[in-house]
Image (cartoon, rainbow, N blue to C red):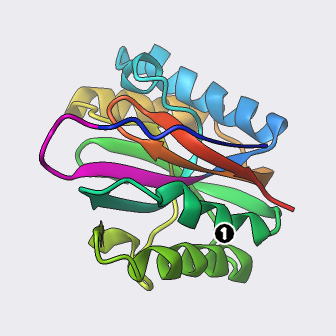
Amino acid sequence: MEFCNIVETKSKGEKMYLISAYFDEHTTRQLQRFIDAVAQNTGNTYMIDNNVPPHLTISSFETRNPQNLCDDFVKLSELESHDINIFSVGEFLPYVIYVTPVLDLHLQQTAEKVYNILAVREDVTINRCYKPYSWFPHITLGKKLEKEQMIAAVRAMQTHFTPLKGKIVRLGLAQTNPHRDICTVDLK
């Protein structure tokens, strides 16, 4: 499946976009359970309120010129789906709780392919945390957490988290705030 629907923005500044990996149904359901557990135990429903699906961000970038983003993005359809192993819960203090997959060769090569497609565009500024050897793969479960909410989120994950083997089956190009896919490609 592939679709593209770039909406013109009215702001004169750059707009943020993400390229994210999405998972098979089983993995998505389990990750959504983790997101729901964090929301229920913390009272912080940011992820749910903003319709942020379980995803692994591979690149975050800004551009003033979104035209042809989908044309470049569909080049990623040549990539293959692959398994991931999610073994750990972590925090970006003070606001984010996440789970993280093992950074294996296949996942690293996917990130490099995405970077190489975006890096040649003069109108794109890639976030420094998503450049080669700076990228830390993570799947956000809760964000904008206050101190007490973070403590509650960790406690929730102590109860609900179990290691998870999953599969990346699709990539999406999304606008942020609110999260909305504008192009997707299924992986081989």
Classify 118 as above or below 164. Answer: below
- Front-most of 29 and 150? 29
Tell me, yes or no, whether the highlighted magenta stretch contains residue 184: no
Q: Nearer the viewer, residue 154 or 133?
A: 133
Point out the stretch of residues depicted in magenta: 9-20
Residue 146 position by quadrant: top left
Neighbor class of circle 1 (other Cα within 10 Å; few <14, some 14-19, many 20+) is few
Q: Nearer the viewer, residue 93 or 81?
A: 81
| Residue 158 in the image, given as x and y percentages of width and height | 56, 37
Image coordinates for residue 71, horizontal then vertical, percent: 57, 61
Residue at image position (55%, 66%) is: 72
Q: Position of residue 38 (x, y in %)?
A: 48, 26
Q: Is residue 159 above or below residue 112?
A: above
* Screen quadrant of the N terminus: top right
For residue 42, above or below residue 122: above
Q: How many marks?
A: 1
Task: Assign a secondary structure to mark 1.
Answer: helix
* Residue 175 as seen in the image, left or right of residue 62: right
Position of residue 182 in the picture relative to residue 135 (left or right):
right
| Residue bearing the label numbered 1 | 75
Coordinates of residue 159 in the picture (x, y in percent): 61, 30
Q: Is residue 116 visible?
A: yes
One can see residue 89 in this view:
no
Query: What's the residue at 36%, 23% (across, down)?
Result: 46
User: Quadrant location of the C terminus?
Assistant: bottom right
**Residue at far left of view:** 12
